[in-house]
Amino acid sequence: MVLNRVAAMLLLSLLTLAGCKDEDPVRAGAPAPDISAMSSDENIVDLSAYRGKVVFVNFWWAGCGPCLAEMPAIDEAYQEIGPSDLAVFSVNFGQEPQIVRNIARRLKVSYPLLSDQLKIAAARYGVRAAPTSFLIDREGILQEAIYGPLTKEQLQQKVERLL
């Protein structure tokens, strides 16, 4: 199990570091940076695989009360809109995968909580604080950066404009 985790982290690091370079800051109207992160069940999730859906990427940290408080609201919006139209990913940046698994067990949200332990995805999106979220359209174009927590209604309004 430990060897599998080490191999998965090494593979994830190699995949993401291969694309590391100084990049322009992310901005609305530009293609969303491609990221890969590890799910709590130790599978690599590549966000580019979700083209054709609206994608909501939420960066969080376990010590952030507003981050944890908004996750159930995000889940309610996700359930009402439906996974056929919307993909939701919450990316923890900088913390151990075990912390992500503990939060996933505690909150029981239906969307994946991902680990970005090396903060590579957070750097690609220019994340400096949590919660910070990004809304990406069906063509993979970043439509909006959202700083601070969202309510279910706010997220639904933002997503429905892109459906």
Image (tube, rainbow, N blue to C red):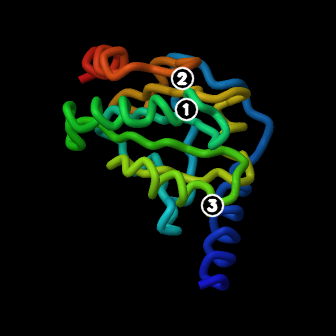
- Residue 28 image position (x, y, % from top left): 53, 17
- Residue 152 image position (x, y, % from top left): 33, 22
Q: Is mark 1 on a helix, strand or loop?
A: helix
Residue farthest toward the right in the current orientation of the protein: 22
User: Is 156 drawn above or below residue 71 in the view shown?
Assistant: above
Q: What element carries label 2?
A: loop
User: Is 89 drawn above or below residue 155 in the view shown?
Assistant: below
Q: Residues within 10 Å of mark 1 (few under 14, many from 20)?
A: many
What's under tag 2, amino acid-wise? Ala
- Residue 128 image position (x, y, % from top left): 73, 27
What's under tag 1, amino acid-wise? Cys
Q: Distance between the residues labelled 2 and 1?
A: 26 Å
* Residue corresponding to mark 1: 67
- The reply, left or right, for residue 92 in relation to residue 74 is right
The label number, if any, that marks residue 97 in the structure image: 3
Residue in the image at 70% along x and 51% along y: 95
- The reply, left or right, for residue 16 in relation to residue 109 is right
Residue in the image at 35% along x and 16% along y: 158
* Residue corresponding to mark 2: 30
Quarter-of-image position of residue 63: top right
